[in-house]
Image (spheres, helix red, strand yellow):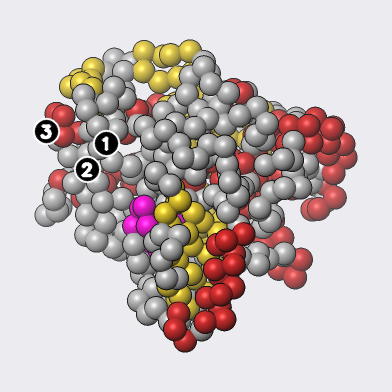
Amino acid sequence: MHFNRRSFLKTTGAAALGLSFAWQCGKSKQPNIIYILADDLGYGDLGCYGQKNIKTPNLDQLAAEGMRFTDHYAGSTVCAPSRCCLMTGLHTGHARIRGNGNVPLKPNDVTVADLLQSVGYSTGLVGKWGLGEAGSTGIPNEQGFDFFYGYLNQVRAHNYYPTFLWRNQEKVELDNKVVYAEEGYAKGLGTAATKREQYSHDLFTREAFDFVERHKDDPFFLYLAYTIPHANNESHLVDRHGMEVPDYGIYKDKDWPEPQKGHAAMITRMDRDIGQLVEKLKQRGLDENTVIMFSSDNGPHAEGGFDPAFNDSNGPLRGIKRDLYEGGIRVPMIAWWPGRIKAGSTTDLPSAFWDVLPTCAQLGGAPIPNDTDGISFLPTLLGNTDDQKKHEFLYWEFHWWKPTRQAVRMGRWKGFRNTPTAEIELFDLKTDISEENNIADHHPEIVEQIAEIMRTAHEESENWPFKKE
C-alpha cells in the first residue's frame, strides 16, 4: 500500500481527541473496549446460534442482553491472515499477511491498538498474536500494545501446556515439559506436553482480569485472543488427542468420543471465564461503560481427532476451516454494551473483521485511516440503522503457496472459485445459506460483476509468495 499509515496517525492522532465519542452519544467518557476472539469456533458452536449439546450460558446471556450478528465474517479462513485483517482494517486483497506464513507486520502498518493508543487508551493483548516473531517489527509492543502476554507464534500456540509464554518481550518460563516435532511444517515449533501443569487458557484469563484491574480508572482496550477450541496438531507425539483441556467437566460421562468431550469442555470453560470477566466488570462498576465484542477467527476445524459434524459445529453452513465457503468464514459475533445496545437485538448487516478497526476507532474518537477497507458498524450497534453505511462487496483470498481461492459476497450473492482460472460458483445466500445450488449459469451478469471484483480487489504485495512455516 502506498498510503503511509504511520504518518497519518502521527498527524491526526492529537486532532482526533476533539472527535471524542461524546459527540455521538452524549457521554464524555471514552468507553472501554474488550474484543474477545475464540480460535476455530464454528458458527454453530454457541447455544445462541443453535447449538444443542455444548453449553454456553454466559455467551448466550451476552447475546440476550446485546446484539447478535447473523452475517458476520472472519478476515480469512485460517488464523494469521484473519488476525491481520482484524488488526489492520484491510481485507486479504490488501493486507500484508494473506496466509499462515512467517510474515511480520511492519513499521508502516497501523493497528486498531495504535489508533486507540493515540487517543489515550491503555492497550493490552492477552493470548495468541501470530503477526510477528520475537525480534521482528511485528511484535505486539511495536504494533500499539502497551502490554502483551501470550504466544507470538501460531504453531507454538497449538500446545496448551507450553514451556514458556511471552510477557512483553521477555520469556516467562512455565512448569510444563514438552517434546518437539522433528519434521514437517511444525519442526522445532510444534510441541506436546509430557508434564502438564499450567494450562495457557487459564493463565490468559488471570492476566485479562489483572489488566482490567490495573486499568479500571483509564479508558482501556483489551484484545483477549483465546486459543480455544483450536486443536494441538502435535498431540500425536504423546499419543493423545488434540483437544487439550484439564478436565471434561460436565461432559465427562457423555457417551461421546474423547475428542468431542474435550472440544465441548474447552468451549464451556471459555464461556465460564467470559462470564467471570463480565462479573468483574460489574463489581468494579465498569459494565455500563464497556463494550464487549466476541467472535472467532475462522470456522471449525477437523483436527486433533475432532469431528465438526458430531455436534454440528458449522450449523447450516457448508465447509469448515480452510474453505472459503460460508462455513470457513462466517462466524459468530456478539456485541454487548448495557444501556447502549438494545437487549436481544439481531442484525443481518453483512460485516467483516476489517470493520472492527473503524468501529473501535469511532467508539474511542480515534482517527480512521482513509485506506481502510472497513466500515464502522457503530450505527447498527446503537440502533441507528438509517445512518449505517454498507459494503458494496466483501472480498477474501486465501493463499497457500500462491493465490488459489477467492470469494466475494455482494448483497445476497456469494461467488467462489478454487483457483484463479476456475469457473466461478454462484450462490444465493438469501435462499441457499448452505450453498448447495450453484446457479452461475442462470445469472451470467452477476458472475461477471463478481469476476471483476476478484480481478480488482487483489493488490500485489511484496510478501508473496511467502516462506511457509
Q: Which residue is mark 3?
A: 239
The quadrant of the image that shows the C terminus is top left
- First along the sequence among labels 3 and 2: 3
- Image location (x, y in percent) of residue 239: 11, 33
- First along the sequence among labels 2 and 1: 1
Residues tagged 2 and 1 counted as in contact (Cβ below 8 A): yes
Q: CA distance from mark 1 to mark 3?
A: 12 Å
**Magenta stretch containing residue 328, yes or no?**
yes
Q: Which residue is mark 2?
A: 304
Q: Kindly identify the residue that appears in the image at 79 percent across and 36 percent down.
A: 8
- Image location (x, y in percent) of residue 3: 74, 40
Q: Does 78 sit left or right of 287 as displayed?
A: left
Q: Amino acid at mark 3?
A: Asp
- Image location (x, y in percent) of residue 456: 62, 59
> Regarding mark 3 in the picture, which secondary structure is present there?
loop
* In front of the other: 189 or 273: 189
* In front of the other: 276 or 388: 388
For disc 1, the neighbor class at 10 Å (few under 14, some 14 to 19, many from 20) is many
Q: Main secondary structure of the magenta part?
A: loop
Q: Kindly identify the residue that appears in the image at 43 percent across and 14 percent down.
A: 171
Q: Kindly identify the residue that appears in the image at 57 percent across and 42 percent down.
A: 461
| Residue 392 sits above or below residue 17 on the image | below
Q: Please tell me the numbered disc located at residue 232.
A: 1
Bounds of the magenta segment? 320-329
| Residue 356 sits above or below residue 310 on the image | above
For disc 3, the neighbor class at 10 Å (few under 14, some 14 to 19, many from 20) is few
> Regarding mark 2 in the picture, which secondary structure is present there?
loop
Residue 67 visible at all: no
Q: CA distance from mark 3 to mark 2?
A: 11 Å
Q: Does 408 sit left or right of 390 as displayed?
A: left
Question: Looking at the rendering, which quadrant does residue 385 occupy?
Answer: bottom right
* In front of the other: 394 or 333: 394
